[in-house]
Image (cartoon, rainbow, N blue to C red):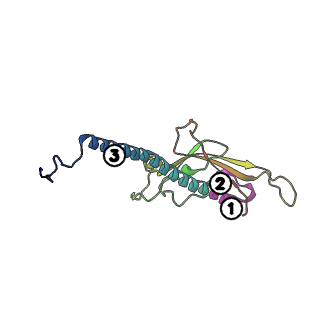
Amino acid sequence: MKACQKHGQGTQSGYSLVEVTLALLVVAIGLTATFALFPEGLKATRAAVDNTEIAMFSEYVFTTLDLTAGFFGAGWGIGQATNYTSQMLSRHVDRTNFRLQANGRVSTFYWYPDYYGLTSGDYEASELHEFWTSAFTYTLDIIEGGWRDGREGQDTGRPISAVLKVWPGEYPQGTTPQGEPRIFYREILPLR
């Protein structure tokens, strides 16, 4: 009888070229799927930032209208809203640039914050145009009438509510904003 040798013939271990190729294919598919999520994540982040900034802008608009109605009383108008501007706006920009427009007119509102480390001085709005942090295209409708005076029961004809439609970003003059606007509504009373 022949003695069995315990040494195997050709018992080398390792991966074949086919196995390595299949492993790389699986990794490539996984990385491709992962990288495809990045643009969607960026879009979701941009939408969340837009929604937050638009909510802050709408609160600014409605607070301005509330303060105007509270200060001027029953006869207030949108033109008087320039008395109230946000503390976030740069002190270098003329207040008339931030006049709210009503009657369904498509307008753009720019935030020019004062925290860019700019040196003090008088800057023109056009020079600061490149420094705005947020721009909103909006329409503001003031709905008048319908509020009855308790003493006389007559329609006072004063503004009682506002509808604000806001689109993120700026659109060239004369173009219609694209996409669905964020719509806000608030009743504006002279006294709260």
Is residue 165 rendered to the left or right of residue 187? left
Residue 157 location (% of width, % of height): 79, 51
* Front disc: 2 or 3: 3
The span picked out in magenta is 61-79
Query: Which of the two discs, 2 and 3, labels the residue nearer the N terminus?
Result: 3
Is residue 174 rendered to the left or right of residue 117? right
Residue 123 location (% of width, % of height): 44, 52
Q: Residues within 10 Å of mark 1 (few under 14, many from 20)?
A: some
Asked which secondary structure carries label 1, the reply is helix
Is residue 4 rendered to the left or right of residue 102? left
Quadrant for the C terminus, please.
Answer: bottom right
Asked whether 41 or 21 is in front, the reply is 21
**Residue drawn at x 60%, y 54% as measured from the top left:** 58
**Residue drawn at x 47%, y 52% as measured from the top left:** 133
Query: Which of the two discs, 1 and 2, labels the residue nearer the N terminus?
Result: 1
The dominant secondary structure in magenta is helix
Disc 1/disc 3 C-alpha distance (Å): 66 Å
Say which amino acid is labelled 3.
Answer: Val
Asked which secondary structure carries label 3, the reply is helix
Residue 55 location (% of width, % of height): 58, 55
Say which amino acid is labelled 1.
Answer: Phe
Residue bearing mark 1:
71
Residue bearing mark 3:
27
Residue bearing mark 2:
80
